[in-house]
Amino acid sequence: MKATYLRNYMLCLALIAALLGCSKSNNSNSDVIYNISPPDIDLPAIKERGVLRAIVDNSATSYFIYKGRPMGYEYEMLRWLADYLEVELKIIIKNDIAEALKLLNEGEGDIVAFNLTITNERKRFVDFTEPLYYARQVLVQKRPDNWRTMKIHEIEQELIRDPIELAGKTVHVRKASAYITRLKNLSEEIGSEINIVEDTVNAEIDELIRQVAEGEIDYTVADEDVALLSATFFPDIDVKTPISFSQRIAWAIRQNSDSLENTINGWLEQKQKTTDYYVVYNKYFKNLKRSANRSYSEFSSVAGDKLSPYDEEIKVASDQLGWDWLLLASLIYQESKFDPNAQSWAGAVGLMQLVENTAEEYGISNRNDPNESLNAGTAYINWLQNTFSESIQDSVTRLKFVLAAYNVGIGHIQDARRLCKKYDADPNKWEGNVEKYLLLKSKEKYYTDPVVRYGYCRGSEPVNYVESILQRYKQYKQLVKSDEIRGFEEDNSVI
């Protein structure tokens, strides 16, 4: 009875300490950070730059690619924020928390949108937005190997249910995480050492949870929402033992970015009242089975290494173009979302959305066949590349012409080039030149001009098409393993 009373008493003290934030500084977190004189970059400078630079990690809740589509709670929130600020979003991926906060204070990023717990230690170096949500820290442990044949009380006897039982145990945690501070405080509160191992190889919490599930390590710690999501996919883990009260999860910003902080807080207050917000929150944190199926799919950048069922075929086809296969994959996602049975309102069919005339020209009989579609589509792209190669030497510019022509037809692109010549613009440049007159082809003055041969064009479609493919390509390059990029180099982090 006395031992039970003492354990309960010590646990109560531990939880009260966590609730009140009575934690000691964590030297392992502070010895890597944090430039104490960050550059003077606040919201006006960000808006003038036109880009919000957000540092995120590749995880099941932050940012990942699933079946070719960028996803994640933090990612969707950041897109909304960028739209609200009327700036572009630039994603920088860093899975190391300390490195991310260091980059923030060096001015390389404007915001760190991880699953970050607000702690007194971190508040010495960065500020935090108002909380996005609240989460407890829980112990992640493996159930007994034969737990399915055991009675509930027998399973419970094998698991840690009282944090005092962590005395003498080894717990692997994410490097520079708030879990380290919590475990150190808990170790002191229970009067016995907990062996804390900071994982420096596998920075993502998803990977540590997988290691517990497969018996490679005994314990890790995770925020409850992430742990519950993982437990849906890894039924052999148990995540029911809390080691803290609810803690605030927020984004980090520089301490001298007052205008950005105030603006984000005001935006968050309003956004969190909307139906859209709850739809996104529920998608990642409430609909756990569906969310886990996405996150731990072979087509997810969190757990898998594929974009689509046709990756190998796309790689072969991309070799014929001299392209990085991720670029061709981005085009195919734009066309069909990797669905060989996709059909557009205009009658385009298959992976590469070929119209009947193009299919006949390149000798294919079944546009729904992935290989036939890839063969004809890449042959057509090769023809476009050859057509533009003599007049457009720059490979990046030529690529934009090819993509636009694939979308809207080469005739409309040549019309826009003829308009460039007439109005003293450069027919061999995209931005501000051919792009501009392609957009103007939706106006009567221009599509009825004598130099125009193919008439009206909704020019915003090919312009947006080019931008979308290249933005997605940059996302793929961040998160999907690929060979060296061929034929096209550009900053790969702007989204």
Image (cartoon, rainbow, N blue to C red):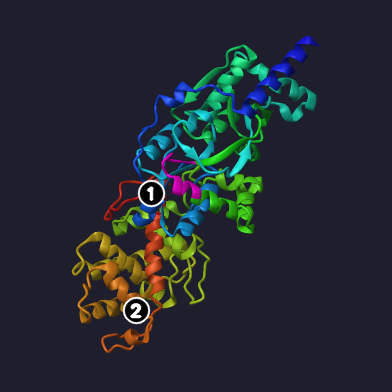
Which of the 4 image quadrants contains residue 446?
bottom left
Q: Is residue 340 left or right of residue 442?
A: right
Residue topped by disc 1: 477
Rendering quarter of residue 12: top right
The residue under label 2 is 440
Image-based side of 39 in relation to 296, left or right: left
Q: Amino acid at mark 2?
A: Leu
Residue 103 drawn at (x, y percent): 37, 38
Residue 367, placed above or below residue 134: below
Q: Secondary structure at mark 1?
A: helix
Up-down relation of residue 454 to residue 402 (above or below): below
Can you see residue 151? Answer: no
Q: Name the image quarter holding residue 160.
A: top right
Of residue 338 and residue 131, the one placed in the foreground of this image is: 131
Which region shows up in magenta? 252-262
Q: Is residue 411 above or below residue 265?
A: below
**Extreme residue toward the top, this view:** 2
Label 1, residues with CA under 10 Å away: few <14, some 14-19, many ≥20: some
Q: Nearer the viewer, mark 2 or mark 1?
A: 2
Q: CA distance from mark 2 to mark 1?
A: 33 Å
Q: Is residue 156 visible?
A: yes
Q: Which three-letter amino acid code belongs to the residue tagged 1?
A: Lys
- Foreground pick, 250 / 240: 250
Q: Is residue 7 above or below residue 77?
A: above
Residue 196 on image: x %, y %: 53, 20
Q: Label 2: how many residues lie within 10 Å, few (<14), some (14-19) or many (20+)?
A: many
Q: Position of residue 282 (x, y in %)?
A: 64, 50
- In which quadrant will I find the N terminus? top right
Which quarter of the rendered picture does the C terminus lie within? bottom left
Q: Residue at x 61, y 52 (%)?
A: 272
